Each structure stands twice: as C-alpha cells, then as structure tokens.
Image (cartoon, rainbow, N blue to C red):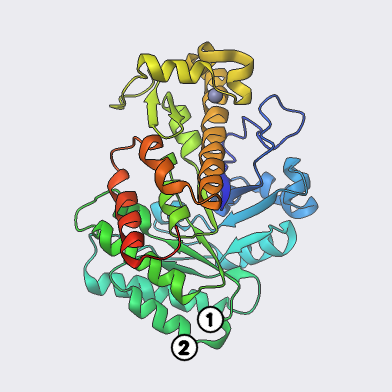
C-alpha cells in the first residue's frame, strides 16, 4: 500500500521530498496537491503549467504527484472546480495521477434523495471524463449498489485501471446518521470485489490505525494530510498508539504522552527526532511544526512498513493484538480479523 502525503501550497515546509533537506523522508514515494490551492495562487499555477509540477517544486522524478480536485474547498464558496482550467492544468502541469475535476460528496446526514442527486452528478462527471487518464470517483454511501450498477453499465468506466473511493471519513467519524462500521466494511469489500484487479485509492485517511483498516481491506493507496494538521495543533502520532499532545497549541482534548510513550519518542528514528530530539517536537512556531510534521509523516510510513511486513510474513494476527492500542479503530480491525477467521481463508 502506498502512502500519499497530502501537501498544501499555503505552507510547503517541511520539504520532506527534497533530498537536500534535513527533513527528507526516503520512504516517501508519492505526494498529493489539491487543485483548489493552485486556483487561489495563480502565480504557482502558472509556473507549474510552464515547467511541470515536478520541476516547479523540486520533487524527484521517482516520486509520484497526485492531483485531487479540491472540490470541497470550492464548495465552501458555493462554487465548483472550473473544469476547463482544471483540464488545462492537468495537460500542462502533468501530474502522475489526477482525479475527475469535480465530485459531489454525500454526507451521512443527507436525505436519500439528496444522496442520490450527489451520486448522479458525480457519475455524470465520471462519464464525461471516462476517455483518458482521469481517475473516476465513487463514494461509500447508502447507495453504493447504484454506483456500482452505473459503473458496470459503462464500458469505458468499468475498464478504467484506477478508481478512487471517497466518503468514508464522515462515516468513520460517527457523525449523525453515519453508516455502521459493519456497513462501511461491507461496502469497501464490495468495491474491492467489483474491481478486483484494479488499483483502488482511498481519500483522506488520518491516523495510524486507519492505515490498518485500509491495508486489511486491500486498498492500494491512501492519502493523508493529517500529519500536517496534527503538527499545527501540537500533536504527534506514535506507531500503534495514535495521537499525543506535546505542545500546547489550540484547545484539543488530546492526552499527553505517558512516561513510557515519552521514552518511545526519545528513541524515535525519524530525521526530526534524530536531529532535534523531544525538545524539537515540543517547540513552537515553524521550527516545532516542521519537526512534528516530519515525525508524523515518518510515523505513518513506519506504521505502514510494519503492517506490510507482518501481512507478508503472515504474522499480522498475532502482531496487531499487542501492537495496536488505538481504542477507536481497534473494534473495526478486530471485526475484520473475525470475518477473516470465519471465512477461514488465508491470513488477511
Ligand atoms: Zn520522531
């Protein structure tokens, strides 16, 4: 499974992709930009179109650049992604992976009619952009069957090599009328089974525990901007444990690290902790942010590395029981393992 680091043009530090930076992460193989950022920063947009995204940001050629449409950002101003501008940007800035220019996210609290309207509008865009490298989007919602029916009915869409899955996050967050964990798991499995040999990307995964869910459901890539969001709030992620507050920034009810967790942080092998230690993580301003962000992204990559290793060695089931202490997502992972045991198949 590939971890795609969500980036923001509003703050490009720490440059985790740049080999000359102390924050360089050699295991990072992909980054994602939201198109909305380029729309609101025309000079950046122009340069990326002139010399290409890789050159514009000094991103090495071995690293893939993903482009999300940023429809959510535009919707805050009651707007939509300007499609011709998006198409021109894709053609000239040359991202390696790019979503369709617009999707309409059904939130759990929407009525059935409203959700169906979102589905139809998203499917119309999927159909309009079925001709070349655009990655179609579908959302996990109460109407997944209808999504899959329409995909299967369209020859060009059903033969796409890559699909992107959205809409899981609002359901996982237990918002009002959210789907049950069981329904979410079954829905993702249904998509996986329908597009068995295709690449599936999951939008917007946040923490270390959700990586387990994504990996066990056999998704191929996930993106996360959580490493930056948490860093800005003074939060660091710990493998197997989740979030801990190390700097007092913002009013977030996040636990401080215990004595044992503090020891784990002191021994951390990420470039930021190796250079600046625990004091670097606790610091304020941009320096502290860069240290925490680098630490957080390194932690996601490390968690993923361990998950993949244990899945490959068929030791996952014994390993996760002692490794994973996250209370929110642990029941979902237990459920996936239970389902697997009942099916008596191979290890997940
Ligand atoms: Zn660290």
Relative image position of residue 115 (x, y in whole percent): 29, 70
| Location of ligand 1 given as a quarter of the image | top right
- For residue 158, the mark is 1
Relative image position of residue 279 (x, y in whole percent): 51, 11
- For residue 135, the mark is none
Relative image position of residue 18 (x, y in whole percent): 73, 35
**Residue 173 vs residue 162: left or right?**
left
Secondary structure of the residue carrying tag 2 is helix
Sequence-earlier tag: 2 or 1: 2
| Residue density around tag 1, few if under 14, some if 14–19, many if 20 or more, within 10 Å | some
Residue pictured at 51% horizontal, 46% vertical: 310
**Residue 183 falls in image quadrant:** bottom left
**Residue 168 vs residue 4: left or right?**
left
- Camera-side residue of 288 and 186: 186
Residue 248, compared with residue 108, is above or below; it is above
Q: Is the CB of the residue bearing disc 2 within 8 angstroms of ligand 1?
A: no
Residue pictured at 37% horizontal, 19% vertical: 257
| Residue density around tag 2, few if under 14, some if 14–19, many if 20 or more, within 10 Å | few
Secondary structure of the residue carrying tag 1 is helix
* Residue 72 in view of the camera: yes
**Residue 129 vs residue 76: left or right?**
right
**Residue 108 falls in image quadrant:** bottom left
Q: Determine contact: label 2, label 1, CB under 8 Å.
A: yes
Residue pictured at 42% horizontal, 35% vertical: 240
Residue tagged 2: 153
Residue 302, compared with residue 47, is above or below; it is above
- Camera-side residue of 42 and 269: 269
């Amino acid at each position: 499974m590939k971890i795609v680091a969500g980036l923001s043009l509003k703050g490009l530090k720490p440059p985790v992709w740049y080999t000359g930076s102390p924050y360089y992460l050699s295991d990072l193989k992909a980054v994602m930009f939201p198109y909305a950022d380029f729309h609101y920063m025309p000079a950046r947009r122009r340069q990326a179109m002139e010399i290409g995204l890789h050159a514009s940001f000094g991103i090495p050629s071995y690293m893939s650049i993903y482009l999300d449409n940023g429809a959510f950002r535009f919707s805050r101003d009651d707007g939509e992604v300007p499609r011709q501008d998006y198409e021109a940007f894709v053609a000239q800035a040359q991202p390696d992976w790019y979503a369709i220019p617009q999707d309409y996210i059904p939130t759990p609290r929407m009525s059935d009619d409203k959700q169906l309207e979102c589905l139809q509008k998203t499917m119309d865009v999927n159909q309009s952009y079925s001709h070349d490298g655009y990655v179609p989007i579908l959302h996990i919602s109460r109407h997944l069957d209808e999504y899959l029916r329409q995909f299967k009915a369209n020859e060009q869409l059903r033969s796409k090599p890559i699909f992107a899955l959205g809409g899981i996050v609002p359901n996982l967050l237990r918002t009002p009328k959210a789907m049950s964990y069981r329904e979410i798991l079954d829905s993702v499995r249904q998509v996986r089974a329908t597009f068995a040999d295709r690449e599936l990307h999951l939008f917007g995964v946040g923490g270390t525990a959700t990586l387990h869910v994504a990996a066990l459901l056999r998704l191929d890539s996930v993106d996360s901007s959580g490493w930056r969001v948490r860093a800005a709030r003074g939060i660091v992620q710990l493998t197997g444990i989740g979030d801990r507050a190390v700097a007092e920034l913002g009013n977030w009810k996040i636990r401080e690290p215990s004595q044992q967790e503090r020891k784990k942080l002191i021994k951390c092998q990420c470039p930021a902790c190796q250079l600046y230690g625990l004091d670097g993580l606790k610091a304020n301003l941009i320096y502290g942010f860069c240290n925490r962000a680098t630490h957080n992204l390194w932690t996601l990559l490390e968690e993923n590395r361990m998950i993949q290793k244990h899945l490959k060695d068929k030791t996952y089931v014994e390993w996760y029981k002692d490794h994973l202490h996250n209370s929110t997502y642990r029941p979902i992972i237990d459920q996936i393992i239970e389902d697997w045991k009942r099916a008596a198949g191979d290890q997940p």
